[in-house]
Amino acid sequence: MKAKARAITYYLPQYYPIPENDEWWEKGFTEWTNVTKAQPLFPGHHQPNLPTELGFYDLRVPETREQQAELAREHGIEGFCYWHYWFGNGKRILEKIFQEVVESGKPDFPFCIAWANETWKGVWHGLDNQILAEQTYPGIEDYTAHFYELLPAFKDSRYIKVNNKPLFVIYKAFDIPDVKVFLNLWTQLAKENGLDGIYFVGHLFDFRKYQEILDLGLDAVNVVRMNEVQRQLPKPQLSLKEKLEYKLKNYSSDIPKYEYKEAIKVLLGEESKNKNVIPTLFPNWDHSPRSKGKTLVLHDSNPELFRQHVKDALSLIEEKPEEERILFIKSWNEWAEGNYLEPDRRYGRKYLEVLKEEIL
């Protein structure tokens, strides 16, 4: 059955212990550590959100990766977009899982890469602003090494392509000081190695700058309108009754909490009708397991509201060429951001089933 869109979900390869997390947080730390510690921060707040059929998995187990791929394929998802960390001078973190996917040839499921070119700070987990791993841009020699590190993936038959070019997302294209040098170099290296080029996609939070990012030389932009929730929607106000309830239960009254049903009105926009603008779908969002309530919570997401969100996105891209009729979904498994499609104890597979019903 032909899908109405090319649904690609961001995939976090974080669910296994690494020396850096052992040092920074605690021995054996993974994303599950924050997920299981989460607590309700206001009346009606559903936490913790916990997995069901896939369990508290360890991504070093190949069978888990096979299960994930089968679940995604079954529900109309074209492939996973793995977050990839290259900090410059060859420094990598969390590379093991993707390397195994490439080298083993399993799971037999399409994939692409998103370069998370951002400095890691303690605030990522609700702590201080200490720099844990700094993102650097050493120049042409490092850019070349980076390309050749990923070349086996780019040449893999499973790699997702647009117009016969491997799709590669850059999280913060504006942060690369010589970005045009980087883009031109990778295009040249791709062609020297038998590829038609690279389909560069800029990940962008401020949709108003989408033309600026395209002007850098990228092929497309993935608009992620999360910031529009607080920019466009009125700040939530508590009634006197609610204020009293919060006080009695010792809840914070200043958590940036917005209703999901209102948020989906601003999470998509008319800019996504443009051929080279890719919208982002959010099944849910609750960053409190990581940030302890310091960043955004989209309250009361449910599968039927997500259905409307999917319908709205499909209507924006329906006139595009088939190859470029792409939807990014954030995310497959960002459990500590309360941002996932994997089955949970509250709704099971319902989000996935809604996606399948609307997209296939």
Image (cartoon, helix red, strand yellow):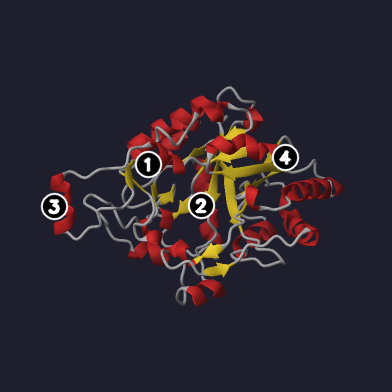
**Mark with earlier residue (1, 2):** 2
* Residue furthest top as drawn: 319
**Vertical placement of 270 versus 301: above or below?**
above
Which badge, 3 or 2, comes first in the chain's sequence?
2
Image quarter in which the N terminus is found = top right
Residue 156 makes an appearance in the image: no
- The CA distance from mark 4 to mark 1 is 39 Å
- Whichever of callouts 4 and 3 sits on the residue coming sooner in the sequence is 4
Front position in the image: 51 or 295: 295
Name the residue beneath numbered marker 1. 350
- Are dots 3 and 2 in contact, CB under 8 Å? no
Quick one: label 3 or label 1, which is nearer the N terminus? 3
**Alpha-carbon span between mark 1 and mark 2:** 15 Å
* Of residues 328 and 297, the one drawn nearer to the viewer in this rendering: 297
Give the x, y percent position of residue 342. Answer: 43, 50
Residue occupied by mark 2: 68
Q: Is residue 25 left or right of residue 166?
A: left
Q: Amino acid at mark 3?
A: Leu
Residue found at x 17% / y 50%: 243
Tell me the mark number nearer the camera, choosing from 3 and 2.
3
Which amino acid, mark 4? Gly
Q: Position of residue 252 (x, y in %)?
A: 25, 57
Cβ atoms under marks 3 and 1 closer than 8 Å: no
Secondary element under disc 2, as helix, strand or loop, is: helix
Residue located beneath label 3 in the image: 244
Q: Amino acid type of disc 1?
A: Lys
Q: State yes or no: discs 2 and 4 in contact (Cβ < 8 Å).
A: no
- Identify the mark at residue 217; answer none if there is no mark: 4
